[in-house]
Image: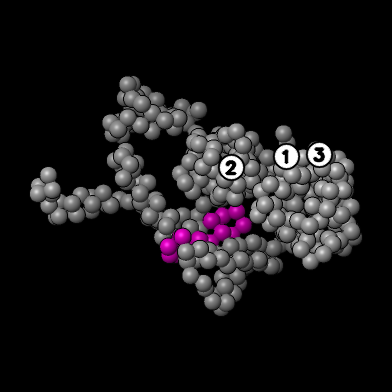
Amino acid sequence: MSENIKVSEVSEILQQQLAGIDTQVQLDEVGTVLQVSDGVVRIYGLRNAEANELLEFDNGIKAVVMNLEEDNVGAVLLGPTDQIKEGFTVKRTKRIASIKVGESMLGRVIDPLGDPLDGKGAIDSSNLFEMPL
Amino acid sequence: MDVGVLSMRYAKALIGYAVDNHVEDQIYEVCKHLGASFRQERRLRSVLDNPILTIDDKLKLIKAAADSKGEPCEEFIRFVRLVLKRHREGYLEFISLMYLDLYREKKHIGVAKLITAVPVGAAVEEKIRNVSQRALHAKGMELEALVDAEIEGGFIFDVNDYRLDASIATQLKRIKQQFIEKNRRIV
């Protein structure tokens, strides 16, 4: 197997993969986790967060804003609670939690945000429409 | 539970009381220290919520958490007694954070944090402080410079509620995430 792999092919594939990668520095609105319990997280800051907006932690776990208060928001975690600790930083994604639906979703295994988990590649999004969660 | 509403009312009352008694600066320092204590010792909130402890025990705890140099000012102690009397000690962390926000808004003070992989010199810190103060039209700027080798390189700059993340570690994470999304495979 290793005899058939050429270095030039590997570097070509890598270049293709790296083409179009977005590395621009972004200015994000962030908050700090104050309290975590039972799948619900209370975040200090995020004054401009919107209801049902998706938030993202540094480790990639997402949460959905459920409760908006003057200087803190309550959000429901879309991942394991034990991986989120008090003091973690969380940023706004400025996307409302929604899921794409359509014919091409039939027979696919997806996570709560509609991303495929079955290893069959990306879902054809040409005929999909967004439905809020 | 309206944590925000409740905490804001107490915080507004505290700042009003502090301004009337000309101790708003002292209470600002006390609240900063109290907030840091809550962050460093996460069990503090649950201990304050414990109904077995008496009000006096909780007051001693809060005094110790609020000031390392000695007793906080009398006005703050009176406020804490009121909070304890009303059984709102579970909200004390939120109240102190809101007080800090209200104070900074009143005094036009900006807050920034610079995280780098290696220490930056005092001249660079001063330059960043001045630039961010001008950009925010603030009368004062609190800049905290931290060193965190885990960011690998670059910097992270937090100013008020915004973050400019130009660290190498975050860029690598984003590249990895984009690889995964492109291929839908864990690499």
For label 3, the crowd category at 10 Å Cα-Cα, with few meaning under 14, some 14 to 19 and many 20 or more, is few
Q: Which residue is mark 1?
A: B3
Residue A67 appears in which quarter of the rendering? top right
Q: Which residue is mark 3?
A: B52
Percent from the top left, x then y, of residue A5? 13, 49
Which amino acid type is shown beneath numbered disc 2?
Ala
Return the disc, 1 or 3, that comes first in the chain's sequence. Answer: 1
* Mark 3 → mark 2, Cα distance in angstroms: 38 Å
Dot 3 falls on which chain? Answer: B
What is the secondary structure assignment of the residue under circle 3?
Answer: loop
Percent from the top left, x then y, of residue A116? 35, 31
Q: Is residue A89 visible?
A: yes
Q: Which residue is mark 2?
A: A49
Q: Residue furthest left?
A: A3
Left or right: residue A16 versus residue B117 is: left
Q: Is residue A96 visible?
A: no
Q: Residue at x 64, y 61 (%)?
A: B111
* Mark 1 → mark 3, Cα distance in angstroms: 23 Å
* Mark 1 → mark 2, Cα distance in angstroms: 17 Å
Left or right: residue B86 versus residue A97 is: right
Residue B130 appears in which quarter of the rendering? bottom right
Query: What span is in magenta?
Result: B150-163
Percent from the top left, x then y, of residue B49? 76, 41
What is the secondary structure assignment of the residue under circle 2?
Answer: loop
Q: Nearer the viewer, residue A27 or B181?
A: B181
Q: Nearer the viewer, residue A81 or B101?
A: A81
Percent from the top left, x then y, of residue B42? 66, 48
Q: Residue at x 30, y 50 (%)?
A: A20
Which amino acid type is shown beneath numbered disc 3?
Ile
Residue B142 appears in which quarter of the rendering? bottom right
